[in-house]
Image (cartoon, grey):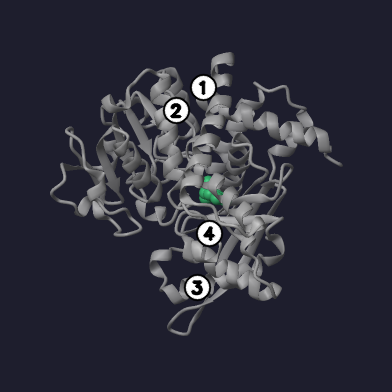
Amino acid sequence: MSANLAEEASDGSEESEPETALETAKRQLARASAHVDIDPNVAERLEHPMKVHEVSVPLRRDDGSVEVITGYRAQHDSVRGPYKGGLRYHPEVGRDECVGLAMWMTWKCAVMNLPFGGAKGGIVVDPKKLSTAEKERLTRRFTQEIRSAIGPTKDIPAPDMGTDPQTMAWLMDAYSMQEDETIPGVVTGKPPAIGGSYGREEAPGRSVAIVTREVCDYYDRPLDETTVAVQGFGSVGANAARLLHEWGAKIVAVSDVNGARYDAAGIDVEKIPSHDTEPEAVTAATGVGTKISNEELLELDVDVLIPAAVGNVLTEENAADVRADLIVEGANGPTTFAADAIFQERDIPVIPDILANAGGVTVSYYEWLQGVNRRQWSLERVHEELDEDMIAAWESVKAEVNGGDLSWRDAAYVVALKRVAEAHEARGIWP
Ligand code: GLU
């Protein structure tokens, strides 16, 4: 997930937040385990994170005062390779949220067949209330606090909500200075000038678009007859909307934190700057369609709904009112467990986050490979390989859907869980 999605919070997500990410992740795991012939001891192991690091980070504010801020790095599973996952700066970051998100990273990497496990970290801070200098000091000191837990073969952070390539550059620099050598592989999602991959920032949105294209094809919907509503215009939402628009779909609604714009005739999404370039540009674009609320966007009568802002926006309260025929998850965890059950009952396919937005971590893997080889790939190569890897993952999930009468989420979990369980069974648990 990319930078600044914290800005994209949809209205109402807090009041109606019935589950934590950890609760949802655990329930999803229990549900998927029932469809996999998994050793119960391995299933028990996977319910728990391997390690959760909690650190106190002193931050010197620009006025000279010192504030002590809590940070986390949750490491869920590393049986298939180093821990991998984003680092978010958000006032509501918590231990359980990091553990739940780390679990999702384990499945996301496995569904994409990447040689990584799952992690997620965060700092309990509102990045909008920090100056650039404060953000840099906080990132450097946090890096120092978690330095022994991370590393290019141990745990590799990446951007997430409220962090961006610049944050990764500071993290890499602080780590490298302390280790006394330049170590680009300690993070992904850094600027290309220091070993970042071309196409990394757009990758989660690109994969959402690829998966939307495939799912429309699966349900016999030509893209040029498909209407799409996208919640969130950060890197995920904006890139998904732009690509789908380019491929012929009609984007009828987009949103930012202040509300949404709707035009049944279609919105020229190229004309609206994404959040990273100009925050809250959607609602500022007064000439575009009519203004509606974020809740109304979720309930529009469209072919495809892409929630690409924050978690827990599709809940027990609004799931019955969603009128989209298909849902493709751009954000991590936008659908609560209860809402998922309602969509299943209503026969609305939900393509899960761990597949749809997995382009981010997949291009992170390419970035890590480029670091190991000290050789940069062209943007064309990144696009080609991503398309290939997304199709391969899509095909494995589709095979489970077709073969087992499973929902798309359960099928993606089954693919991931089989791979993770097989690795655990081969290595053994060493109790
Ligand atoms: N934060 C992103 C995600 O949730 C990417 C993680 C990564 O590239 O390691 O998928």
Describe the element under mark 2 as helix, strand or loop: strand
Name the amino acid, label 1.
Ser
Q: Nearer the viewer, mark 4 or mark 2?
A: 4
Please name the residue that numbered disc 1 is placed on: 407
Describe the element under mark 3 as helix, strand or loop: helix
Q: Earlier in the sequence, mark 3 or mark 4?
A: 3
Left or right, 24 with respect to 309, comes to: right
Q: Earlier in the sequence, mark 3 or mark 2?
A: 3
Location of residue 216 by image quarter: top left
Describe the element under mark 1 as helix, strand or loop: loop
The reply to whether dot 3 and dot 2 touch (C-beta < 8 Å) is: no
Nearer-the-camera pick, 395 or 103:
395
Nearer-the-camera pick, 310 or 199:
199
Please name the residue that numbered disc 2 is placed on: 350
Distance, label 3 to label 2, CA atoms, is 38 Å
Distance, label 4 to label 1, CA atoms, is 36 Å
Q: Judge the density around disc 2: few (<14), some (14-19), many (≥20) Cα neighbours within 10 Å.
A: many
Name the amino acid, label 3.
Glu
Please name the residue that numbered disc 3 is placed on: 136
